[in-house]
Every structure is written in structure tokens, then in C-alpha cells.
Image (tube, helix red, strand yellow):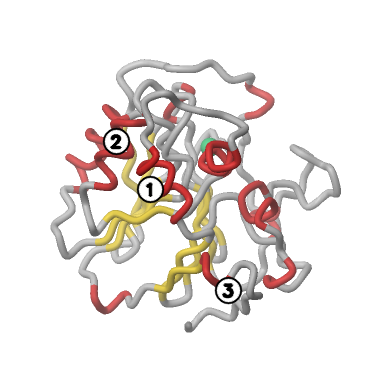
Amino acid sequence: MTTNLTLNSAIDPSHEHIDSAEWDDIYVVGDVHGCREVLEQLLARLDPAPNDLVVFVGDLVRKGPDSKGVLDLVRAHPNFRSVRGNNEQKLIDGRKSIETLTDDDLAYLESLPLIISWDDVAVVHGGIDHRKPFDEHTLTELLNNRSLVPDGSYERPFWFEARPESPRVFFGHTVLSEPFVSEHAVGLDTGCVYGGQLTAYDYRADELIAVDPPETYVSRSSDSIVEPATLDP
Ligand SMILES: [Mn+2]
């Protein structure tokens, strides 16, 4: 791999490295949360060809109206890949369930890597804490990282605002009032299930593409929607 991430044996099987030269365009897509209709709108805008890669930051499922439909759509395209989100993990662990999902769907969720990388990019659902070696991160941290304050939840600084180094980490999980874009982190969960947008990042063009959902599916308190800020690292 070309990133400076070193991985321990517990996490290594969950790392998918991609040769970017094998793909034309590469798009990274924020949390979909079962909003199939919005995903279809976004894909109509992106219009990915079979030799374009679409990478999801995880949380394909739960909260929205059609988790099964989102999984069917993603799984039908060999050029669509996803990392595992904390909501996939809840289904894998049996803490939550969705009636419409088959055993095969659950096996697919379990097969999702924790990290996908190419060039000097890493995609993880929650985030990476630059203060400790990557190989000391637990699964729970990779899927849920947000505040750098111990037990801080929504206390600043957030890992992505403080990230000072490569690889550039594309992430979801933290619902943002607008996408976060810095040299070393790109946050794409703009809360499409909460009345926000579904956002993608065009890696080759360095451009954001976003679509508006037809309706608000779930309400969320405004104190858990983050106004992104860039700190001097
Ligand atoms: Mn999410």
C-alpha cells in the first residue's frame, strides 16, 4: 500500500487496497441510511460507467425507508464498494435487526472492510485519531471516532478538524450541516435521512456533488448536527 497506515492482524483482513489506475472516475459517497430514492437521484447525476468506482463511507442501512433496496442496488454493481459503518456493525452484532434483510445480506455486511485505500487516501466510517498509531485503533474507534476529547462525544476538537497528516481520510458518521473538506480529511455525511443532502466527492475532479431528498425521513436534534470548522493543525 502507498499510505503510511500500518495495520495489525486484527484489522488487516478488513483492509481493501485499490489500484486507482484500474479505474477511471472515483466517487466517494456519504451515509445513505436506507434512502434508496435519494441514492438513485445521486447516481443519475454521477452516471458512473462500469469502469468508474463508487465507494461508500458506510451506514448504507438503517433509519431510512429502504435499507434492503439500497443493499440490492449496491450489491448489483461490482464497481460499488463500501466500508463498514457502525450501523452495519449493529446488524452484524445482532444489536439491531431489519426484517427484510436475508442471511446473504448479513454475510455481505460482515464482508465489508473497515478501511478502503488507494493512492494517499483512506476511507473509514468514523475516523482516525492521529495521536496514536493506526494499528492501535479498535474496530469500535474506526467506526465511531468523532471527538478527540476522551468520552467527549460532541466536544471539540473533532479528529477531522485537527488531522495534520496524510493519508487524506474520507469519512461519514458525523452528521454535518455542510461537507467538510480539508487537505487531510473529507466529511461527506450531510444527513440525507435527516432532511440534509446526500453528498458525493469526485476524486479526480476534486468536486462535491450533492442532491436533495424528496422528504425528511427522520428528525434529528440540531445539537447533533455539526457545523464544520477548520482548525489550524
Ligand atoms: Mn451514519
For the point 38% across and 32% down, the residue is 101
Residue type, numbered disc 1: Val
Of the pair 184 and 73, the residue shown nearer to us = 73
Marks 3 and 1, how far apart in space? 20 Å
Callout 2 environment at 10 Å: few (<14), some (14 to 19), or many (20+)? many
Image position of 149 (left or right of 79):
right
Quadrant of the rendered image containing residue 90? top right
Q: Earlier in the sequence, mark 2 or mark 1?
A: 1
Q: Name the residue under label 3.
A: 166
Image position of 96 (left or right of 207):
right
Name the residue at the bottom extreme.
2
Query: Are the residues tagged 3 and 1 within 8 Å (C-beta)?
Result: no
For the point 35% across and 16% down, the residue is 215
Callout 3 environment at 10 Å: few (<14), some (14 to 19), or many (20+)? some
Residue type, numbered disc 3: Ser
Q: Is mark 2 on a helix, strand or loop?
A: helix
Query: Comparing marks 3 and 2, which lies closer to the viewer?
Result: 2
Image position of 45 (left or right of 151):
left
Marks 2 and 1, how far apart in space? 9 Å
Q: Where is residue 51 in the image (x, y as percent from the top left)?
A: 17, 65
Residue type, numbered disc 2: Leu
Q: Is mark 3 on a helix, strand or loop?
A: loop
Q: Name the residue under label 2.
A: 39
Marks 3 and 2, how far apart in space? 29 Å
Query: Comparing marks 3 and 1, which lies closer to the viewer?
Result: 1
Q: Where is residue 157 in the image (x, y as percent from the top left)?
A: 76, 49
For the point 22% across and 42% down, the residue is 43
